[in-house]
Amino acid sequence: MKKNVYNFNAGPSALPKSVLEKAQRELLNFDDTGMSVMELSHRSKAYESVHQEAKSLLKKLLDIPDNYQVLFLQGGASLQFSMIPMNFLHEGKKAGYVLSGSWSEKALKEAKLIGETTTLATSKEQKYRSIPTINENSLADDYAYVHITSNNTIYGTQWQSFPDTGDVPLIADMSSDLLSRPLDIKKFGMIYAGAQKNLGPSGVTVAIIRDDLLAGVKEQLPTMLSYSTHVKADSLYHTPPTFAIYMLRNVLSWADTQGGAIALEEYNEQKAQLIYEAIDTSNGFYQGHATEDSRSKMTVTFTLPTDELTKAFLEEATHYGFVGLGGHRSVGGCRASIYNAVPLEACQALHSFMNDFRRKHV
């Protein structure tokens, strides 16, 4: 008998039920080939259609202009922390990083190994409770790029609007909120995202890079670490993660049927409002980590009055079928990751559970 659970895992995270059912139906015989998509040659026509449809759907859903390239890479967002400065941070230039959480810290750490960097803004002293503000007028011609992390899964903060960096390319790690809301892609020189939050399973990383930025890729890089390699080969220089890209395509197709980014944003706002309402009406029993102006609609983080109550909350939640509500090991507390595929019903159930638990323990 199938066990019903409410999946709030931070990543790999929930996938749409219909997408999983489609993969189940096609697992042994994809597109009448008599083989699983995992068995197909990545040079075959059957796989090629999957690859190209995934790219086309992403371009459609995000309204990606023609002067951007879409790449399917491996190594997660973490490899991009190194590849970005390796490709774009030239001698005599510096890279500006905005620190809004642990992942932006890790990105900066890797860039420091490659070239000159500077921290443009940080909210670390405030325990990353808010998104810091950039002095946009401080950006000069000697900046190779500005890097931000759009959603901070550990701390539950999210950029509500993006800075205008002028002629300096803006690069964003959007691993945990890409496709959760409409974007003006033209604001960015590059966007990258591990798929395992909103786009599909782990194993594939999406990179969207503007042509003028690609024109400045450094020469004499290791072949696999040059974006030029993957652009020229259409992400097929080596065997790509074919099943992950197949699942990416299916998730993107599902997102299209839901109404695209606009509809998903409205749905995500409904889900987030339910949980934030349980926090805000609790008279301090639940304390949200993020300041109200920086609250994430993808990751809701909160604490209870004591560690004992937190433990009891998580144990009881598990009993009722809630999965993945424990906070990140570095900060503790609780965290509900409510990515695109998490249904409204799961958030309604969590809202009710939070209210019931509070009433029993005040």
Image: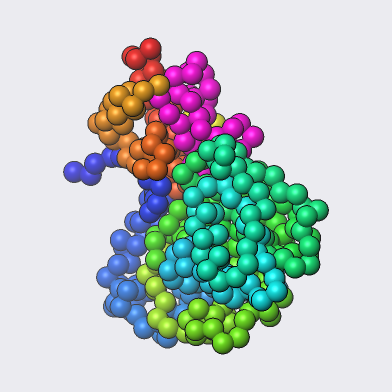
Quarter of the image where the C terminus is located: top left
- Check the image and tell me how it is coloured: rainbow
The residue closer to the viewer here, 8 or 159, is 159
Q: Residue at x 42, y 77 (%)?
A: 240
The residue closer to the viewer here, 343 or 201, is 201
List x then y, in percent, for residue 86. 56, 74
Residue 6, picture quadrant: top left
The residue closer to the viewer here, 328 or 137, is 137
Residue 141 located left or right of residue 349: right
Q: Which residues are magenta?
A: 276-304
Please tell me whether residue 150 belongs to the stretch shown in magenta. Answer: no
Establish if 293 lies above or below 245: above
Q: Residue at x 54, y 80 (%)?
A: 226
Establish if 57 lies above or below 154: below
Residue 268 in sight from this viewpoint: no
Establish if 16 lies above or below 352: below
Which residue ends up furthest to the top in the rendered image? Answer: 362
List x then y, in percent, for residue 127. 53, 38
Please tell me whether residue 285 belongs to the stretch shown in magenta. Answer: yes
Which residue ends up furthest to the left in the rendered image? Answer: 1
Which residue ends up furthest to the right in the rendered image? Answer: 137
Q: Residue at x 46, y 60 (%)?
A: 195
Residue 33, picture quadrant: bottom left
List x then y, in percent, for residue 85. 58, 70
